[in-house]
Image (tube, helix red, strand yellow):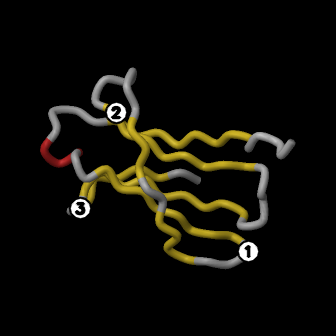
Amino acid sequence: PVVGRLEEDGLALSFTRPKDLPDVVYLAEASSDLIDWIALPLVVVSDGPLQSVRAVDPSAPTAERRFVQLRVVRAPADP
């Protein structure tokens, strides 16, 4: 499951992912208008075969409105 929550340090996005999927990329992003997105760093909170990951948008507490999204994409194949 993906959980979004406003916390002291910003709008946090938390999720779990399998560790051993080299061809899958997880991208957390934030936006104020749903058009322009900026990347948020991912932090592994709990490591193991199933990782708990968190991303925080620190701009959220002072912004009029803020959105976060999680994109999951297939990594490009090596040539």
Element marked by disc 3: loop
Q: Position of residue 4 (x, y in %)?
A: 41, 50
Residue 14 in picture, x, y percent from top left:
47, 58
| Number of marks in picture | 3
Residue bearing the label numbered 3? 9
Disc 1 packing (10 Å; few <14; some 14–19; many ≥20): few
The mark that comes first in sequence, 2 or 3, is 3
> Amino acid type of disc 1?
Pro
> What residue does disc 2 label?
31
The image shows residue 37, relative to residue 11, as above or below, that is above
Amino acid at the residue labelled 2: Ser
How far separated are the C-alphas under marks 2 and 3?
17 Å
Q: Quadrant of the C terminus?
A: top right
- Against 47, residue 22 (above or below) is above
10 on left or right of 20: left
Identify which residue is drawn at 56% across, 68% down: 52
Q: Residue at label 1?
A: 49
Q: Is residue 2 left or right of residue 17?
A: left
Picture quadrant where residue 51 is located: bottom right
